[in-house]
Image (spheres, rainbow, N blue to C red):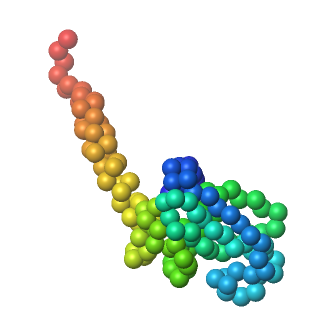
């Protein structure tokens, strides 16, 4: 899912993301004192508040769509968090797959398949005509 698509889902569902500084990220193995940690809540009318942790290098200020994008890459880690099922539903994710993005990829392929067939048909229609071997003028 692109940053623009994530932004659209956030806007379409009136979702807001709050970040509160915390001392650590319990979902991150090992001690990561060189990172800044945040306790986040994604909420809005379409979902039960989804609570998760986010960590970043000091000085970085990712926008909400970037935070959600990074969260989606590791979504299975947050199965026990409140609002998880609503988050999956709103962002059209399925954690039963090996990769949460797989469902979205299949939807995109299904949408593009007819276009690929049209392009292939146009390619065949526009194939150059083989030159004639005859000497006629």
Q: Seen from this angle, which residue lies furthest bottom?
A: 30
The residue at the point 53 percent across, 82 percent down is: 80
The number of numbered discs placed on residues in the rendered structure image is 0
Q: Position of residue 84 (x, y in %)?
A: 50, 73
**Relative to the observer, which residue lies in front, 122 or 45?**
45
Q: Is residue 19 above or below residue 79?
A: above
Residue 119 appearing in the image: yes
Q: Nearer the viewer, residue 117 or 102?
A: 102
* Residue at the (51%, 50%) spot, across then down: 12
* Residue at left offset 70%, top offset 80%: 25
107 or 49: nearer the viewer: 49
Q: Is residue 93 left or right of residue 66?
A: left
109 left or right of 57? left
Q: Residue furthest front?
A: 45
The answer to whether 49 appears left or right of 95 in the picture is right
- Pick the quarter of the image with the C terminus: top left
């Amino acid at each position: 899912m692109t940053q623009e698509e994530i932004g659209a889902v956030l806007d379409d569902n009136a979702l807001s993301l709050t970040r509160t500084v915390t001392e650590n990220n319990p979902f991150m193995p090992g001690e990561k004192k060189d990172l800044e940690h945040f306790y986040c809540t994604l909420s809005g009318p379409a979902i039960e508040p989804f609570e998760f942790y986010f960590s970043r290098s000091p000085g970085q200020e990712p926008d909400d769509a970037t935070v959600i994008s990074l969260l989606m890459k590791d979504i299975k880690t947050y199965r026990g968090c409140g609002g998880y099922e609503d988050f999956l539903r709103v962002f059209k994710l399925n954690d039963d797959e090996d990769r949460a993005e797989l469902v979205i990829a299949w939807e995109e392929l299904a949408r593009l398949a007819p276009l690929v067939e049209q392009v292939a048909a146009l390619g065949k229609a526009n194939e150059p005509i083989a030159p004639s071997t005859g000497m006629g003028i």
